[in-house]
Image (tube, rainbow, N blue to C red):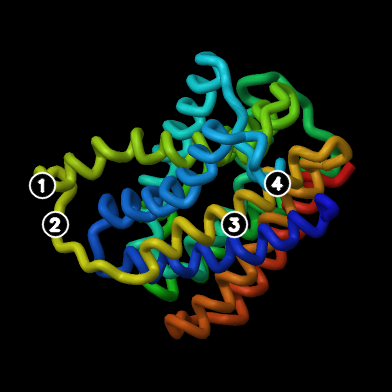
Amino acid sequence: MSWLLLSILSALVLGAYDLTKKAAVQDNAVPPVLFFSVLTGALVWLPFLIWSHGAPGSFPSERFLVVGMSGQEHLLILLKAALVSSSWIFNYFAVKHLPVSIASPIRSTSPLWTILVAVTLMEESPSLHQWVGIVVILGAFYAFSIVGKLEGIHFHRDRWVGFMVVATLIGSFSALYDKYLLQTRGMGAATVQCWFSIYLVVVLFPFSMLWRAGRFGSREFRWRWTIPMIGLTLLVADFFYFVAIGQEDALISVISPLRRCAVLVTFLGGMALYGEKNFRPKLACIVVILLGVLLLNWK
């Protein structure tokens, strides 16, 4: 399957992932939702790991084969798990308290933060159309703040908007790190995803224990079927993404904006499932954000 089609499929499933995440954390404790969702992903990969190491010769498909790694490679994936976990902690708390039709578009601006970090810390110089893309996204972001005021959300002082921005910024680093692992280091998609899923459980276990000790506010937790669905939809979306980015001719500059299109699925779902307001102005802002993302990644 081509990396282009894989990227589109990843975006569609990623939109479903955002909707199940909102359903799971709404009026619910975040730490156990996060922990049980990543535990689901690890349990799915565990049989593949055991089979790959126990009887690799009988494994039916190399696509899901988990190969051995060096200690250094394990540390690299553990670092990825720590990076993503910190992003998710901020993200889940933001999604719990914000309308999904606002939270997801903020998340979709991640290419903007990647370029701004590159300009600030790496002394890179964006092209003219990338500067135009930055201005377009910032303009759409400002427009979203105006729409948010209609729902009582003030972007410049709302802590949950700040949480989503921090989550998005960390997620931008994670996307660059994925490219390093899969292309520069040449690690297999199944191997990365399997151990990443397992190390997520390791990293987030202390967080869930702190919640049990009463360190994160409300301890009220309700089990919902959407909790394991978070893990399952993320596994499918990430698998399509990892396989796509691992192909030699794959262009991250195309994959990135395609993945951002997941916000359209989330936006429409938020309107249909949660009855969220201000459809037209939010849709206009999303279209402008996607246009800005396209300009950022246009070569």
Q: Which of the two marks, 2 or 3, is nearer to us in this view? A: 3
Residue 144: image x %, image y %? Answer: 55, 64
Q: What amino acid type should be assigned to the residue bearing mark 2?
A: Arg
- Kindly state the secondary structure of the residue where label 2 is placed: loop
Disc number at residue 180?
A: none
Disc number at residue 214?
A: 1
Q: Residue at x 41, y 67 (%)?
A: 22
Work out whether mark 2 precedes mark 3 in sequence or the reverse, and give the earlier one: 2
Q: What amino acid type should be assigned to the residue bearing mark 3?
A: Val
- Kindly state the secondary structure of the residue where label 4 is placed: loop
Q: Residue at x 67, y 56 (%)?
A: 260
Work out whether mark 1 precedes mark 3 in sequence or the reverse, and give the earlier one: 1
Please say if the residues under marks 1 and 2 sit with CB atoms less than 8 Å apart. yes
Q: CA distance from mark 2 to mark 3?
A: 30 Å
Q: Which of the two marks, 1 or 3, is nearer to us in this view? A: 3
Work out whether mark 1 precedes mark 4 in sequence or the reverse, and give the earlier one: 4
Against 236, is 248 above or below?
Answer: above
Pointer 4: what residue?
A: 61
Q: Residue at x 32, y 39 (%)?
A: 204
Residue 286: image x %, image y %? Answer: 65, 66
Q: What amino acid type should be assigned to the residue bearing mark 4?
A: Ser
Q: Is residue 13 visible?
A: yes
Q: Quadrant of residue 131?
A: top right
- Kindly state the secondary structure of the residue where label 3 is placed: helix
In this view of the protein, which residue sits in the foreground, 107 or 147?
Answer: 107
Work out whether mark 4 precedes mark 3 in sequence or the reverse, and give the earlier one: 4
In this view of the protein, which residue sits in the foreground, 145 or 200?
Answer: 200
Against 240, is 285 above or below?
Answer: below
Pointer 3: what residue?
A: 236
Q: What amino acid type should be assigned to the residue bearing mark 1?
A: Gly
Q: Which of the two marks, 4 or 2, is nearer to us in this view? A: 4
